[in-house]
Image (cartoon, rainbow, N blue to C red):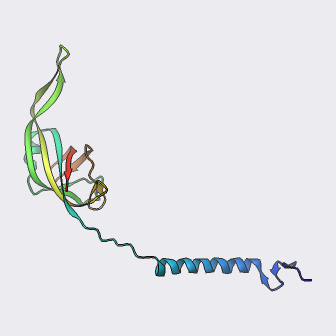
Amino acid sequence: MKRIIDQNGRLFGKISIIDILFILVVAAVCAAFYVKFNVLDVTSKAVDTVPVTYSITISGVRDYTVNSLQVGDLLYDNDNSGGQPVGKITYISVQDAVRTVEKTDGTIVNGPVEGCYDVTLTLIAEGIVSGGRYLVNRTYDINMNSERIFNTKYAVFTATITGVSS
């Protein structure tokens, strides 16, 4: 009676086990390529964008920063937006800056900050709304109350995102 594997490591004396393993690996790779390119549906990359309106608040800036902001300017966040604009200024609201201060008797009051202003910018951008998330440029996440460094052509400032709607 013949042995299944002979002294040379061949199956039934004809083919090596390593050859069989190689053939199985090649067959598995071919099957994987077939499934990937012929069986699986192609995922659609087309996503409808909608206008996203959001507002940011800049606290305690001087008049030269206020004067450098204009309706129609593009807003950037170079740290997170990949150099793409994250919105266009559609409205600017300027108020005298007010800060909470503690008086010498321990009471806390709101007091004006001389020569400084709080500016609220309303911005519009094309974005994706998905699962309660707002994404501008498909990757830039608009999160309420997040503080970021923004810039326009003429100004750089830190602002807080204070409102989002689509």
Q: Which residue is found at the position 26% from the left and 54% from the top? A: 78
Compared to 85, does 110 lie above or below? above
- The residue sitting at 89% across, 83% down in the picture is 2
Q: Is residue 113 above or below residue 108?
A: below
Which quadrant: the N terminus? bottom right
Residue in the image at 8% along x and 42% along y: 94
User: So how many labels did they put on this image?
Assistant: 0
Write down the quadrant of residue 49 in the picture: bottom left
| Percent x, y of residue 72 | 10, 57
Residue 160 at x, y percent in the picture: 22, 43
The residue most toward the front is: 131
Q: Residue 147 location, x and y as percent?
A: 26, 43
Question: Which residue is at 27% across, 48% downward?
Answer: 143
Using the image as rendered, state which of residue 128 and residue 14 is in the foreground. 128
Q: Is residue 62 at least partly visible in the picture?
A: yes
160 left or right, relative to 29: left
The foreground one among 11 and 165 is 165
